[in-house]
C-alpha cells in the first residue's frame, strides 16, 4: 500500500532512515481506534452537511469498519514508511474504495485538529481508568484503617518520634491526599472533554463543517473554540501530566514509608510474598521491590511532565512537528501511574501489621513528651514555654539515665522544676498516670482531625461517604462515554444499512 498520498509537493521520497525518524507509528497504536471513530464522525457530519453523498459515506464507513475489525483481530501492522496512523488509515480507505471516494475522507480536516482530537479521546478514558484505580487504592486504605483504628504507633517528623498516633490516622491522611488527587482529575477532565475537531490546520476551513455535530457524536461537552488554540495549545496534556506527577509524589511517599517500616530495624509491617522479591545471592532476603519500583516510576512520570514542558516552551504558535513527541511522554506517564496504583492497592490490602512492635516503639521512646508539657500548662498553669523547657530538660536526663517516660515519678518533675524554673510545682500521682497512658493521650486530643478515637471514627465515616460519591461521579463519566460510543456505532449502522 503506497503512503505517498501526502507528498505531492515533494519530488523525492525520503530514505528509510528519514522515514523512520519522521514516523510516530510506534506511539500511534494507542490512538488507532480513536482516529477511526473521529474519522467516522467527521464523515457522517460531512454527509449531513451535503458535502458527501450517501453512497460515498456508505463506502467510507464500510471501509473504516472493516479496518477496525482487522485491527482488533491483530491483522494490522503499520509499516514504518507511514508518517503516522492518520496517513495509514486514509491510505487504507483510498486503496479499498478508490481515490474517487476515499480521497474525500479528509475533506475539511487537517492532521493537526485530527491528532488533537485523538489525544483528547484517549485521555478521557485514561483519566477514567486512573480515577478508578485511585478509588480502589482509597478503598484499600479505608479497609485497613477500619481494621487498625486502635493500633498505636509513633508519628514522625524529621524521621524522629514526634507524637503518639494510630495506624488508622496515618492511613486516613493519604485517603485525604488521594481524594484531592481525584478532585484535580475531575476538574482536569472537564477541560480535556472539549473537541478541537473542525479547527483545520490553524485557521479553520471554508468547507461547511458542523463542529458541534462532531463533538456531540463523539461525546464531548463542548468545543475548543479558537482554531489556533485548538491545534497548538498543549496545556491540557501538561495539566494531565502535572496531576499525575502530583499523584505519584504521594504514592512514592507511601511506598517510602512502607519500605522503611518493612525493614528489620522497624518491623512495623510485612509485605505479602506476592508483592516482594528476593536476592540472587542472599537467601534470607525478602525485598520490598514493588514499593521501590513505585518510587522509581515516580521519576518516570515527573520526567514525562518535564519532557512535555521542554517541548512546548520554545515553540512558535501553531502546530510544530515537535509536538509529535508529546504522545510518547503521555503514554509513559499514564502507564506508570496505572501500574503503581494497582500494585500499591494490593500491597496495602495484603500486608501484615505488627501491632505489638508499633506499640513497643511508642512505650520505649519519648513520644508522650508533648502530652506532658501540655498537661503541665493546662493542669498546673505553667506558661507553655516554661513547660516546654522543663520537659526538655527532663527528657535529656531520662535519655542519659536510660529511663523510660512510663517510669516517670512526680517527685522527679518537682525537683527539676525547682532547678530549671526556680519555682515549686506540685504534681499529682494520678496526673502522671494519665500522662503516661497512650490511650488516654489519644483521648486527650481535642483538635479536629487529630487521632482522637472519636475523630478517627468520624473521619472514617465521612471519607467512606466521599468514596461512594466519587465512585458515582466516575461511573457517570464512564457511562457518558459509553453512551457516546454506542450512539456513534448506531449512527454508523444506520448509514451502512
Image: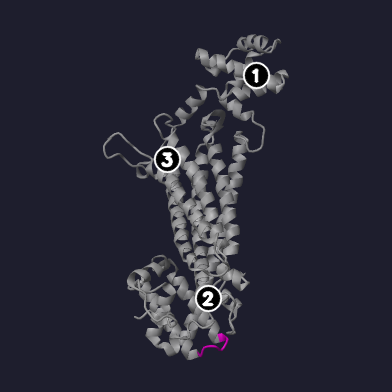
Q: Is residue 184 left or right of residue 341?
A: right
Q: Residue 487 bears which disc, if any?
A: 2
Q: Residue 43 bears which disc, if any?
A: none
Q: Residues within 10 Å of mark 2 (few under 14, many from 20)?
A: some
The dominant secondary structure in magenta is: loop
- CA distance for labels 1 and 3: 41 Å
Residue displayed at 65% across by 19% down: 389
Residue corresponding to mark 3: 351
Q: Is residue 45 above or below residue 307?
A: below
- CA distance for labels 3 and 2: 44 Å
- CA distance for labels 2 and 1: 72 Å
The earlier-in-sequence mark between 1 and 3 is 3
Instruction: State which mark lies toward you, 1 or 3.
Output: 1
Q: Is residue 32 left or right of residue 233?
A: left
Counting from the top left corner in percent of width and height, residue 459 is at 61, 42
Quarter of the image containing the N terminus? Answer: bottom left
Q: Identify which residue, 17 or 180, lies in the foreground.
A: 17
Counting from the top left corner in percent of width and height, residue 471 is at 55, 56
Q: Residue 389 bears which disc, if any?
A: 1
Q: Is residue 390 above or below residue 76?
A: above
Badges 2 and 1: C-beta atoms under 8 Å apart? no
Badges 1 and 3: C-beta atoms under 8 Å apart? no
Q: Residues within 10 Å of mark 1 (few under 14, many from 20)?
A: some
The quadrant where residue 67 appears: bottom left
Residue displayed at 57% across by 48% down: 464
**SS of the residue under disc 3:** loop
User: Which range is magenta?
Assistant: 48-53
Amino acid at each position: 500500500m503506497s503512503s505517498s498520498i501526502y507528498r505531492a509537493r515533494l519530488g523525492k521520497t525520503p530514505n528509510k532512515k528519514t522515514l523512520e525518524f519522521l514516523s510516530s507509528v510506534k506511539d500511534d497504536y494507542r490512538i488507532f481506534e480513536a482516529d477511526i471513530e473521529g474519522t467516522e464522525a467527521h464523515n457522517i457530519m460531512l454527509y449531513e452537511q451535503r458535502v458527501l453523498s450517501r453512497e460515498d459515506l456508505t463506502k467510507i464507513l464500510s471501509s473504516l469498519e472493516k479496518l477496525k475489525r482487522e485491527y482488533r483481530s491483530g491483522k494490522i501492522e503499520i509499516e514504518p514508511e507511514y508518517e503516522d496512523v492518520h496517513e495509514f488509515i486514509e491510505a487504507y480507505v483510498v486503496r479499498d474504495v478508490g481515490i474517487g471516494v476515499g480521497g474525500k475522507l479528509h475533506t475539511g480536516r487537517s492532521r493537526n485538529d485530527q491528532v488533537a482530537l485523538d489525544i483528547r479521546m484517549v485521555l478521557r478514558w485514561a483519566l477514567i481508568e486512573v480515577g478508578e484505580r485511585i478509588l480502589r487504592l482509597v478503598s484499600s486504605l479505608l479497609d485497613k484503617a477500619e481494621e487498625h483504628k486502635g493500633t498505636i504507633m509513633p508519628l514522625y517528623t524529621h524521621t524522629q518520634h514526634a507524637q503518639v498516633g494510630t495506624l488508622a490516622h496515618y492511613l486516613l491522611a493519604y485517603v485525604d491526599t488521594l481524594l484531592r488527587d481525584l478532585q484535580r482529575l475531575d476538574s482536569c477532565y472537564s477541560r480535556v472533554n472539549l473537541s478541537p475537531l473542525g479547527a483545520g490546520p490553524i485557521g479553520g476551513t471554508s468547507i461547511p463543517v458542523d463542529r458541534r455535530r462532531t463533538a456531540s457524536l463523539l461525546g464531548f461537552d463542548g468545543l475548543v473554540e479558537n482554531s489556533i488554540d485548538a491545534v497548538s495549545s498543549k496545556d491540557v496534556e501538561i495539566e494531565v501530566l502535572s496531576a499525575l506527577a502530583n499523584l505519584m509524589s504521594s504514592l512514592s511517599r507511601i511506598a517510602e514509608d512502607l519500605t522503611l517500616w518493612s525493614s528489620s530495624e522497624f518491623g512495623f509491617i510485612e509485605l505479602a510474598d506476592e508483592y516482594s522479591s528476593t536476592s540472587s545471592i542472599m537467601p534470607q532476603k525478602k525485598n520490598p521491590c514493588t514499593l521501590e519500583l513505585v518510587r522509581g516510576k515516580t521519576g518516570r512520570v515527573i520526567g514525562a511532565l518535564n519532557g512535555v514542558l521542554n517541548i512546548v516552551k520554545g515553540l512558535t504558535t501553531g502546530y510544530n512537528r515537535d509536538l509529535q513527541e508529546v504522545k510518547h511522554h503521555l503514554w509513559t506517564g499514564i502507564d506508570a501511574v496505572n501500574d503503581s496504583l494497582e500494585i500499591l492497592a494490593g500491597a496495602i490490602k495484603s500486608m501484615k501489621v505488627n501491632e505489638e512492635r508499633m506499640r513497643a516503639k511508642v512505650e520505649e521512646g519519648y513520644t508522650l513528651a508533648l502530652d506532658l508539657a501540655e498537661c503541665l500548662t493546662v493542669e498546673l498553669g505553667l506558661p507553655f514555654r516554661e513547660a516546654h523547657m522543663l520537659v526538655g530538660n527532663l527528657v535529656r536526663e531520662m535519655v542519659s539515665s536510660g529511663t523510660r517516660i512510663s517510669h516517670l515519678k512526680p517527685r522527679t518533675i518537682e525537683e527539676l522544676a525547682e532547678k530549671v524554673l526556680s519555682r515549686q510545682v506540685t504534681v499529682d500521682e494520678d496526673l502522671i498516670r494519665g500522662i503516661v497512658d497512650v490511650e488516654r493521650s489519644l483521648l486527650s486530643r481535642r483538635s479536629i482531625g487529630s487521632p482522637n478515637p472519636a475523630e478517627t471514627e468520624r473521619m472514617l465515616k465521612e471519607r467512606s461517604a466521599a468514596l461512594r460519591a466519587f465512585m458515582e461521579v466516575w461511573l457517570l463519566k464512564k457511562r457518558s462515554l459509553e453512551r457516546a460510543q454506542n450512539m456513534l456505532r448506531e449512527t454508523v449502522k444506520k448509514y451502512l444499512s
